[in-house]
């Protein structure tokens, strides 16, 4: 595995691979890798000849008072895990390399970036769009793999690819969960044993939401069921519980797939989770 820290070096390496007709798959990450990330790398490994994984804690997607300074960082551990997945290139740029002094242009996500996660974290999705657009331009991948765990981010990425005409196949890989239902997240390391237990309320609220929808087909009732469960759950400070269209994050289409989304704080740790429910599972919108 090559470890590359500069974008110009990465461009040269990839030019060489592309000249040989090899396809390139990109997995953008912020490091602190866990089994969820590794499932994305495996997906890229399966679908492309050359796998590039970027590890970059992007300051632009953290708001004031968020955990940028304390975000878990373990580049040695990350590199070890990436070697184990037969990653070809690990790209670990510095903040100065990604955002040289004087850089001012940014990409904005538009309305989809202003609701739910975007409402709670103003500017977050603009930061994600900006860094991912830069990574797309540096790597010029044939495909890029994102996780369904960050469902709104995946929807924003679909818009980014479409709206800015990136010729990239976007692959969204399923959420990886612990056996008790907790969705894997780099932020789980912040949780004490008690908080980890309390955090299970998020995935449980989604299961209750799915059952409510299956029985009633009523989005409002589904939303209310999830919200009530989270409000009653010990140790959870709920941010939102919603039922949305998985692509637009607007109100769901009457007969389409729906996405159940929840977010809340357990202690100081903000956690999100989601579940797709097929229209056939419920009675409609
Ligand atoms: O999902 C993440 O880890 C980040 O938002 C991403 C896509 C790597 C951009 O910094």
Image: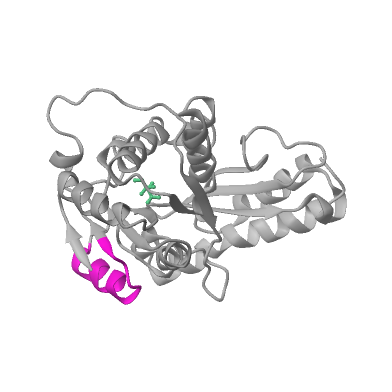
Give 72 or 49, whichever is nearer the viewer.
Answer: 49
Residue 156 in magenta stretch: no
Quarter of the image with the C terminus is top right
Q: How is the image coloured?
A: one colour
> Is 259 placed left or right of 201 in the picture?
right
Residue 75 in magenta stretch: yes
Q: Looking at the image, is 191 positioned above or below residue 80? A: above
> Magenta segment, principal secondary structure?
helix
Residue 202 spot, x, y in % from top left: 57, 57
Marks counted in the figure total 0
Quarter occupied by residue 91:
bottom left
Residue 4 spot, x, y in % from top left: 17, 56
Quarter of the image with the N terminus is bottom left
Q: Looking at the image, is 120 positioned above or below residue 170? A: above
Q: Give the range drawn in magenta.
A: 74-89
> Is 264 placed left or right of 127 in the picture?
right
> Can I make out residue 58 in this image?
yes
Q: At x 62% / y 34%, what residue is drawn? A: 248
Q: At x 32% / y 26%, what residue is drawn? A: 106
Quarter occupied by residue 250:
top right
Q: At x 25% / y 40%, what residue is drawn? A: 59
> Can I make out residue 30 in this image?
no
Residue 35 spot, x, y in % from top left: 42, 70
Residue 230 spot, x, y in % from top left: 61, 52
Q: Looking at the image, is 253 positioned above or below residue 26? A: above
Q: At x 54% / y 36%, what residue is drawn? A: 116
> Is 12 placed left or right of 32 in the picture?
left
Quarter occupied by residue 155:
top right
Give 146 or 233, whichever is nearer the viewer.
Answer: 146
């Amino acid at each position: 595995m090559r470890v590359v820290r500069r974008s110009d070096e990465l461009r040269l390496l990839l030019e060489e691979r592309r000249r040989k007709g090899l396809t390139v798959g990109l997995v953008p990450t912020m490091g602190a890798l866990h089994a969820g990330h590794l499932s994305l790398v495996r997906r890229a490994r399966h679908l492309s000849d050359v796998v590039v994984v970027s590890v970059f804690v992007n300051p632009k997607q953290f708001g004031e008072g968020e955990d940028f300074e304390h975000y878990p960082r373990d580049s040695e551990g990350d590199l070890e895990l990436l070697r184990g997945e037969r990653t070809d290139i690990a790209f670990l740029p510095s903040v100065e390399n990604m955002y040289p002094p004087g850089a001012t242009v940014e990409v904005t996500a538009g309305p989809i970036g202003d609701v739910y996660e975007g409402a709670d974290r103003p500017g977050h999705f603009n930061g994600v769009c900006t860094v991912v657009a830069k990574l797309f331009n540096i790597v010029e991948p044939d495909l890029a793999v994102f996780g369904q765990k960050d469902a709104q981010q995946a929807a924003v990425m679909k818009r980014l690819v479409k709206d800015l005409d990136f010729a990239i196949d976007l692959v969204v890989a399923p959420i990886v969960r612990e056996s008790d239902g907790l969705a894997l997240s780099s932020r789980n390391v912040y949780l004490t044993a008690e908080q980890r237990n309390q955090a299970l309320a998020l995935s449980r609220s989604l299961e209750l939401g799915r059952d409510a929808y299956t029985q009633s087909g009523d989005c409002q009732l589904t939303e209310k069921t999830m919200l009530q469960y989270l409000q009653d759950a010990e140790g959870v400070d709920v941010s939102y519980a919603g039922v949305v269209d998985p692509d637009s994050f607007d109100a769901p289409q009457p007969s389409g797939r729906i996405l159940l989304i929840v977010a809340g704080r357990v202690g100081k740790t903000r956690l999100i989770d989601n579940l797709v429910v097929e229209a056939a599972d419920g009675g409609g919108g």
